[in-house]
Amino acid sequence: MAASKQPTLEDGDFFADVTFSDLTIESADLSNREFERCTFRRCTLPHSRWVKTRLEDCVFERCDLRQMVPERLALRGVTFADTRLMGVDWSQLGTMPVVQFERCDLRYSSFVALKLRKTRFVGCNAREAIFIDVDLSEADFTDTDMPGSTVQGCILVKTNFSLSTGLLFNPQANQVKGARISVETAVALAQSLGMVVEGS
């Protein structure tokens, strides 16, 4: 009996319960497609386009999605794990995205005017990432490296930065009630406002 052929991204516009493994496609156009309960594993898809695509309960593991274009991409219960997402502009995502980032490369990424309440950014590299006018209420940045990142006009109510590193933002330019930060970050914030922290 012949082995079944692994589905490819060219096989249709709707995929459910499919695992895509070890695919390499430069500048793939995956627009206007629907993926439900799909897994992308070790896929190399830099500069791919996901315009008006819908991802529901999908997982990306150890993928390369550098500079992907997620314009009006609908994310519902999506997890990116150990995935390269460097230089991605997430600002045109579909409404109310539900997404998690675990140990991802988010360097130079942009998040502007989004609602990302309770989103997990755990163990990520977010150097020089941009967060402007984002609702990050109760988001979790545990073990995420953030030097050079921009955080401005954001809602940081109960946001957890307690174990993030390299973070510096102006508390007067954000809503920070209940935000959790480390001693290192507290000292850096005080010094940035011109205060002298004794014993630091």
Image (cartoon, rainbow, N blue to C red):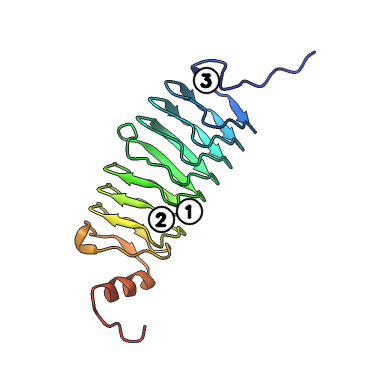
Residue 130 at x, y = what percent? Answer: 34, 51
Pick the front one: 128 or 21 = 128
Residue 115 pos. (x, y %): 29, 41
Which is more foreground, mark 1 or mark 2? 1
On screen, residue 4 above or below 82: above
Label 3: few (<14), some or many (≥20) within 10 Å?
some
Quarter of the picture containing the N terminus is: top right
Position of 176 relative to 87 (above/below) = below
Q: How far apart are marks 1 and 2 (CA)?
A: 8 Å
The residue to which callout 2 is attached is 141
The residue at 52%/35% (across/down) is: 59
Mark 3 lies on a secondary structure that is strand
Of the residues shown, which amino acid type is indicated by label 3?
Answer: Phe
Q: Point out which mark residue 15 bears.
A: 3
**Quadrant of image for the C terminus:** bottom left
Q: What residue type is labelled 1?
A: Cys
Quarter assignment of residue 141: bottom left
**Under tag 1, what secondary structure?**
loop
Q: Residues within 10 Å of mark 1 (few under 14, many from 20)?
A: many
CA gap, disc 1 to disc 3?
29 Å
Query: For the point 60% across and 28% down, which residue is it?
Result: 19
Ranked by sequence position, the earlier of labels 1 and 2 is 1
Q: Residue at x 48, y 44 (%)?
A: 85
In the displayed structure, 121 sits above or below 54; it is: below
- The answer to whether 64 appears left or right of 167 in the picture is right
The residue beneath circle 1 is 124
Say what secondary structure mark 2 lies in.
loop
**Residue flagged by tag 2: what amino acid is it?**
Phe
Q: Position of residue 49 (x, y in %)?
A: 45, 30
Find residue 34 and name its label: none
Tell me if I can see residue 165 in this picture.
yes
